[in-house]
């Protein structure tokens, strides 16, 4: 292939590769569609962009006209040189059009056509970023919201996985979309229903898509909606957290729970759903990829749940609760250290029975707190550690695992 001379005008000025889908910009320069679209997309954060060749101003929403003549020449040339190792360039798919997309959205209301419409829209959304952007502009997200609510009211799960994925991929936080979901308690109820529903196929996919959408809408929902979430909502989230193997779903659930935890009685509802026990089990299992970021989320949520008496009681009830918290201290990240010390401080201040204090000593929590004072870490973490040690120096000072000066050197 190196010995074959490729006509210069077959090559994209950006990628310098043979063009698969040549398109011409408004200023007359031809590029491969993928290359020029990536160029324009990369320039989206800039105030303006220019043509890579002429350096003239080029609007980011410029029309890209397919150069059919050049594409046919390239395809013919590739076929003619096929014996020399040149691969044939396939005919590219036609770009999505506004009229076609509007028709697909309208077909959602047709009981015969809606499945085919959803599948086509799903394929388009998965295919590339430009399709997703165009679908967002046309109002695909709003159409999916209405479709999901309709399924909820009718008790029909057909097409839900596709609708949820399209909504997640094409979501655009426009004022209209935000307003549509901001005060929609019904939509949260529909997600709860989806999480509870048992389907014959793609059950895991459906529920993963549901929690991804849930995280998205939680960020824009009003406080009045988030404060009214029912116990069943949290029970289903914890159940999915126990069952799912999707790291994306796990993180979405944890982020959702962290977001809603401080509001109303949500903290108690999460504790009553068994979250504390399962979070400890997740950490003790220690088999997850991307462990650091997930651990940080787990400890962030645990710290919030332990701020109430029932949350602390659940952590202390688990045989490995205190041990797990102390084991993670100084081993994951500064964020995890902060939350670990916060949990131990809450236990030391509000739940410090003689039995609990001796358990902290026996599982190495006290030794770990002492190590924080000696470690190369932030001063505020050292201060937290000293405060915990001072609270119970009379119980721990005689233990061989703690140096006396660490609890007596700093005045109370």
Image: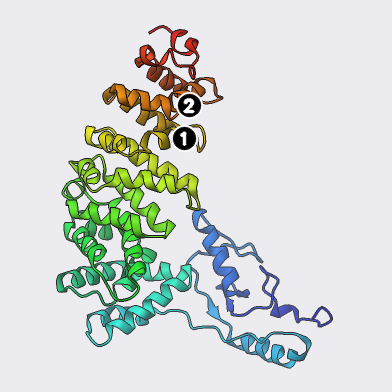
Q: Which mark is residue 327?
A: 1
Q: Position of residue 307 (x, y in %)?
A: 27, 32
Q: Which numbered disc, 2 or 1, marks the residue that appears first in the sequence?
A: 1
Q: Quadrant of the N terminus?
A: bottom right
Mark 1 crowdedness (10 Å alpha carbons): few <14, some 14-19, many ≥20: some
Mark 2, residue position: 368
Residue 173 appearing in the image = no
Is residue 108 positioned above or below 332 on the image? Answer: below
Which residue is painted at 18% across and 41% down in the image? 264
Q: Position of residue 40 (x, y in %)?
A: 54, 64
Mark 2 crowdedness (10 Å alpha carbons): few <14, some 14-19, many ≥20: many
Which residue is painted at 40% across and 70% down in the image? 134
Q: Residue furthest right?
A: 3
Q: Position of residue 357 (x, y in %)?
A: 34, 23
Which residue is painted at 55% across and 24% down in the image? 375
Say which quarter of the image contains residue 102.
bottom left
214 or 368: nearer the viewer: 368
Determine whether, in the image, residue 378 is placed left or right of residue 246. Answer: right
Q: Secondary structure at mark 2?
A: helix
Determine whether, in the image, residue 397 is placed left or right of residue 88. Answer: left
Which residue is painted at 37% across and 43% down in the image? 280
Give how far apart the Cα atoms at labels 2 and 1 are: 8 Å
Q: How many marks?
A: 2
Say which quarter of the image contains residue 358.
top left
Q: Quadrant of the C terminus?
A: top left
Q: Are marks 2 and 1 in contact (CB under 8 Å)?
A: yes
- How is this picture coloured? rainbow
Q: Secondary structure at mark 1?
A: helix
Q: Position of residue 43 (x, y in %)?
A: 54, 58
408 or 394: nearer the viewer: 394
């Amino acid at each position: 292939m190196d010995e074959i001379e490729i006509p210069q005008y077959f090559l994209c000025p950006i990628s310098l590769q043979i063009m698969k889908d040549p398109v011409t910009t408004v200023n007359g320069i031809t590029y491969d569609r993928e290359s020029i679209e990536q160029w324009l997309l990369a320039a989206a954060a800039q105030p303006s962009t220019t043509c890579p060749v002429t350096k003239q101003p080029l609007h980011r929403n410029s029309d890209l006209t397919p150069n059919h003549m050049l594409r046919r020449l390239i395809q013919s040339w590739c076929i003619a040189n096929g014996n020399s190792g040149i691969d044939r360039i396939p005919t590219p798919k036609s770009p999505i059009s506004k009229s076609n997309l509007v028709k697909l959205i309208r077909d959602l209301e047709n009981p015969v056509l809606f499945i085919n419409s959803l599948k086509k829209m799903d394929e388009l959304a998965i295919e590339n970023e430009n399709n997703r952007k165009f679908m967002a502009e046309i109002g695909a997200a709003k159409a999916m919201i209405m479709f999901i609510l309709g399924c909820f009211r009718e008790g029909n799960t057909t097409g839900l996985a596709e609708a949820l994925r399209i909504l997640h991929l094409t979501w655009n936080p426009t004022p209209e979309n935000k307003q549509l979901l901001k005060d929609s308690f019904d939509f949260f109820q529909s997600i709860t229903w989806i999480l509870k529903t048992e389907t014959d196929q793609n059950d895991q996919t459906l529920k993963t898509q549901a929690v991804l959408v849930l995280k998205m809408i939680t960020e824009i929902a009003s406080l009045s909606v988030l404060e009214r979430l029912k116990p069943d909502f949290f029970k289903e989230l914890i159940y999915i957290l126990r069952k799912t193997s999707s790291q994306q779903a796990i993180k979405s659930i944890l982020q959702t729970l962290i977001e809603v935890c401080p509001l109303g009685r949500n903290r108690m509802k999460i504790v009553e759903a068994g979250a504390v026990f399962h979070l400890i089990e997740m950490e003790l299992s220690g088999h997850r990829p991307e462990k650091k970021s997930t651990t940080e989320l787990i400890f962030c949520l645990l710290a919030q749940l332990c701020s109430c008496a029932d949350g602390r009681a659940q952590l202390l009830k688990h045989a490995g609760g205190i041990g797990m918290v102390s084991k993670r201290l100084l081993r994951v990240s500064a964020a995890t250290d902060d939350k670990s010390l916060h949990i131990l401080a809450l236990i030391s201040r509000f739940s410090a029975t003689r039995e609990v204090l001796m358990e902290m000593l026996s599982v190495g929590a006290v030794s770990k707190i002492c190590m924080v004072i000696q470690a190369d870490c932030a001063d505020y973490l050292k201060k937290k550690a000293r405060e915990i040690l001072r609270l119970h120096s009379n119980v721990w000072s005689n233990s061989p695992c703690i140096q006396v000066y660490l609890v007596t050197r700093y005045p109370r």
